Image (spheres, rainbow, N blue to C red):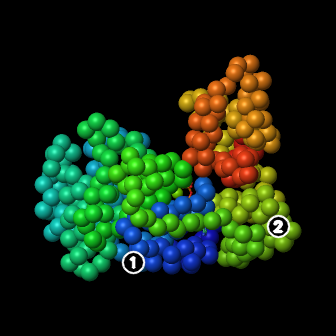
Amino acid sequence: MLFDPKPKESRKDLFDRENELMELKNSIEQGPLITLCIGVRRSGKTSLIRTFMNEYRYPSLYLDARKLSDYGYSRAGFLRLIADGFNEYRGLVDKLKDHLKKIKGVRISQIGIEFEYSSRDVSFSSILEQLDRYAEKHETIFLVVFDEAQELRFLSGYRRLDIRKIIAWSYDTLHNIKFILTGSEVGLLHEFLGFSDPESPLYGRVKNMVTVDRFSKEKSLEFLEVGFNEIGFSPPKEVLETVVEKLDGIPGWLALYGYTVAQKKRFDVLEEVLEEAITLALSEISKLKKYSELYLYVLRAIAIDCNTWKCIKNYIETKTGKILANARLYYILKNLENFSIITKENDEYVFLDPIYREASKRL
Ligand SMILES: Nc1ncnc2c1ncn2[C@@H]1O[C@H](COP(=O)(O)OP(=O)(O)OP(=O)(O)O)[C@@H](O)[C@H]1O
Ligand SMILES: [Mg+2]
């Protein structure tokens, strides 16, 4: 169902991403080792990748790095994440059994793969080596997909893991492994990977980018029409036009509207959907307060169209009664860009999503 609120897993539920699927395919088959999938929040990055994995059926590992916040940003937490990736599809471990058995500290049982977390022998590179051999033997490509890959940055540190180094090593050594990296905090992802940062292990390595854009106005209308048709609803065109205007072509919010209509069996739910979307966005941006109250002031300023550097600075200084150092404001704005909340257009800071703007007015 097009309006299912979960990330999509198959082509029949994924609206209009044929070009992006093709771009991904070309990138995996002919492009460099690393493909980045980028796009604003809720644009459908996870859906695109999950569908791609299911449709094209390369042997693959899907790893959602958010789980590390639960498993721990440690070697053991990372291995648990990898084990989950293997165990997600029953057939995968069976297929790879002979190769995985060669890695010390790996146990294969009825439930799937387990790692001896204490064993220093289990390393991500030894796993990749075996996946590479499997792919070579079967004349295929093994895909390693990191969703929310910006989270991997917390893994590096003393006696921990720098995934970038292992990717760089894989880049130089292995020939049948490809990485897809995506995340909702695009700036952080770029910063972490550091393709143009001489300090980064990935500096200068070639990557490809697949962008998942929001839908155009026409596509948004078509998305709603096709989705409603699928569930036997026929909403008036004017209603849909208002919905598209308010939700600005962001697939996640459009799907939420459709889903809510399907649940409540009426069309006048835009206000409720906006409220839900704003509440979601608000809970996300409110978390920034624990880093600094300044984030909230900056967001509030931009939300009321005080969006030049000078205006934001004046706004904060008036509100707090304190002088704000330029470096501090620069840091806060840069981070908000990195989190994919705002962007800079012609010297003005603007929200990427009107929902976040509305949420910021309530901070
Ligand atoms: N092309 C599409 N067709 C149908 N539904 C879609 C499409 N793209 C996104 N959606 C829906 O929008 C919502 C968000 O999609 P998804 O989680 O894939 O986006 P995302 O870009 O990964 O989001 P985030 O930035 O939060 O990680 C989900 O409900 C998904 O089902
Ligand atoms: Mg996602």
Residue 144 placement: quadrant:
bottom left
Amino acid marked by disc 1: Glu
Q: Which mark is residue 29?
A: 1
Please give left or right for residue 232 compared with residue 111 in the image.
right
Residue 113 placement: quadrant:
bottom left
Q: Residue pushed farthest bottom?
A: 139
Q: Where is residue 27 in the image (x, y as percent from the top left)?
A: 44, 74
Q: Which residue lies under the disc numbered 2?
A: 241
Please give left or right for residue 155 compared with residue 191 in the image.
left
Mark 2 close to ligand 1, CB under 8 Å? no
Q: Position of residue 98 (x, y in %)?
A: 15, 69
Mark 2 / mark 1, whichever is N-terminal: 1
| SS category of the residue bearing label 2 | helix
Amino acid marked by disc 2: Glu
Residue occupying image coordinates x 76% and y 42%: 307
Q: Where is residue 140 in the image (x, y as percent from the top left)?
A: 30, 78
Please give left or right for residue 35 compared with residue 260 in the image.
left
Q: In this view, does 80 lie above or below 220?
A: above
Q: In this view, does 133 lie above or below 247?
A: below
